[in-house]
Image (cartoon, rainbow, N blue to C red):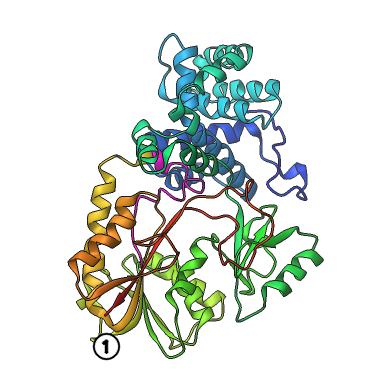
């Protein structure tokens, strides 16, 4: 039996409802992706695998699949708890996955309860491996609906479940930031990420681009020095001016990197660990400098090239080098760089709202392992910097081992390094915490602080 087509809410409200994929099919594929995530795959990889198994998947199906699966991952802790309360025996993995994605949609209120349960049961019956358990799944979902208020209240009594993080992650946040700020961080990281664009100032201005959006009936506001927030998310291919190179998709916090580096005309700049190229492009947009973008993965290096081409920034001033930044002898010509940007590999603990699988894929020991890698990168790149030159160390992390502790340890190891203050009262660097778009002011002011952003740490190191 095939699942009955049921219109799901289109990602773009202007799109015709008829283009919506069958909900039952979406649930089946989402359960497959959820199983991959549960087995340790990243969410992106699990989604790709699910789509590859579905021949002829449309853009609408891919979008709906991502929405449904991401919703389930954002409610992972609660759905796991609900299963223990509702099931008297552990279900088979495929049934468990279908329950998880279905009950997450019930929690989100994305569909009428009857429709969701009906389509979940039809999805179970449509597969030979889950058909026999369709009645069991139906009973679980209906029992949840009957006891929803009681079960949700019980689930959210546990702070880690409520914040959708493992206990060790919550303990780290509490230790560093205290209870109130931890709750603010978790609230920001569990919301839908805002769609923020960076305006290419070589092609247009923020004011002119906002006028263009208004003329096309799209609500938007300024979210940073060159940042624009689209109040309603759109597929990238439908963002006005994207294909023309007017804008790029980049969080407002990430947009601080290039300005903080302080590039001047004629400077030689190294962007280490450069993929996918957003910061490389921003450096080229802001100054008449030459940039060497180093990336060890050839496929990701091609993405840097593609971004530079789209933004009309290609030329001899922009070189993409496939190399490992930990081994400068493989790419460095011996001439010192005036500026170096090191956007180092990290736990990504500051961008959980964009990648909610991070908290479940990381392990407590990963923080120390990544901090060691970051230190090795800093030590390897420091000799490449000219005297009086500056290196900006950046991570999308909110853990101090990767932030203030990392920059302070570096200065202790290198007597010829000093930390340039970026914010008054914040020694060691600038820690930006995830800030909710819901709680942020609607207008950007002249403080140069974004109105909202993901979590980032920046430390500007000068060679003295």
Residue 229 position within the rendered picture, expressed as x and y whole percent measured from the top left: 65, 59
Residue 321 lies in what quarter of the image?
A: bottom left
Q: Position of residue 417 (x, y in %)?
A: 25, 73
When the figure is inspected, residue 411 is found, relative to residue 22, above or below; the finding is below
Relative placement, left or right, of 167 versus 226 is left
Which residue bears the numbered disc 1?
335
Up-down relation of residue 235 to residue 271 (above or below): above
Most distant residue in the top direction: 88
Write down the region rendered in magenta: 342-359
Identity of the residue drawn at 67% across and 32% down: 110
Residue drawn where x is 65% and y is 62% of the image:
444
In the image: residue 64, left or right of residue 408: right
The secondary structure type at the circle numbered 1 is loop
- Residue 132 visible? The answer is yes
Residue 187 is covered by the magenta coloring: no
347 sits to left or right of 216: left
Q: Residue at x 62, y 60 (%)?
A: 236
Determine the residue located farthest toward the bottom in the rendered image: 266
State the residue in front, 362 or 386: 386
Residue 345 within the magenta-colored segment of the rendering: yes
Q: Nearer the viewer, residue 23 or 446?
A: 446
Query: Which residue occupies the foreground of this view, 412 or 271?
Result: 412
Say if 310 sits above or below 4 in the image. below
Q: In which quadrant will I find the C terminus?
A: bottom left
Relative image position of residue 17 (x, y in whole percent): 76, 42
Magenta portion: prevailing SS class: loop
Quadrant containing the N terminus in the rendered view: top right
Q: Position of residue 146 (x, y in %)?
A: 63, 11
């Amino acid at each position: 039996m095939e699942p009955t087509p049921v219109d799901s809410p289109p990602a773009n409200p202007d799109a015709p409802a008829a283009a919506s994929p069958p909900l039952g099919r979406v649930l089946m594929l989402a359960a497959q992706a959820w199983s991959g995530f549960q087995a340790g795959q990243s969410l992106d990889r699990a989604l790709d695998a699910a789509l590859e198994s579905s021949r002829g998947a449309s853009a609408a199906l891919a979008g709906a699949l991502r929405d449904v699966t991401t919703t389930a991952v954002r409610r992972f802790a609660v759905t796991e708890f609900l299963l223990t309360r509702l099931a008297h025996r552990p279900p088979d993995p495929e049934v468990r996955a279908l329950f998880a994605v279905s009950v997450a949609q019930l929690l989100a209120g994305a569909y009428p309860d009857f429709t969701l349960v009906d389509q979940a049961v039809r999805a179970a019956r449509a597969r030979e491996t889950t058909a026999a358990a369709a009645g069991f799944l139906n009973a679980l979902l209906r029992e949840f609906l009957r006891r929803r208020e009681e079960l949700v209240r019980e689930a959210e009594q546990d702070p880690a479940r409520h914040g959708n993080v493992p206990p060790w992650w919550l303990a780290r946040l509490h230790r560093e930031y205290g209870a109130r700020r931890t709750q603010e961080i978790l609230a920001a990281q569990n919301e839908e990420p805002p769609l923020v664009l960076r305006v290419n100032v070589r092609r247009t201005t923020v004011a002119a681009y906002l006028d263009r959006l208004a003329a096309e009936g799209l609500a938007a506001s300024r979210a940073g020095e060159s940042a624009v927030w689209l109040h309603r998310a759109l597929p990238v291919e439908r963002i006005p001016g994207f294909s023309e190179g007017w804008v790029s998709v980049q969080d407002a916090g990430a947009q601080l990197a290039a300005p903080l580096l302080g590039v001047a005309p004629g400077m030689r700049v190294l962007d280490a660990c450069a993929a996918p190229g957003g910061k490389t492009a921003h450096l080229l947009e802001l100054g008449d400098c030459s940039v060497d973008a180093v990336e060890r993965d050839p496929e990701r290096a091609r993405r840097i090239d593609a971004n530079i081409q789209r933004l009309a920034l290609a030329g001899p001033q922009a070189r993409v080098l496939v190399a490992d930044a930990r081994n400068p002898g493989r790419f460095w010509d011996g001439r010192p760089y005036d500026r170096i940007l090191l956007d180092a590999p990290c736990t990504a603990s500051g961008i959980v709202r964009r990648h909610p699988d991070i908290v479940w894929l990381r392990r407590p020991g990963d923080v120390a392992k990544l901090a060691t890698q970051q230190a090795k990168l800093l030590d390897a790149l420091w000799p490449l910097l000219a005297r009086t030159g500056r290196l900006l160390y950046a991570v999308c992390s909110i853990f101090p081992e990767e932030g203030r502790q990392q920059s302070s340890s570096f200065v202790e190891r290198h007597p010829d390094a000093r930390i340039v203050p970026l914010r008054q009262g914040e020694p060691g660097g600038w820690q930006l915490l995830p800030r909710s778009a819901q709680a942020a002011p609607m207008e950007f002011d002249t403080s140069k602080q974004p109105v909202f952003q993901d979590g980032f740490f920046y430390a500007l190191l000068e060679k003295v």
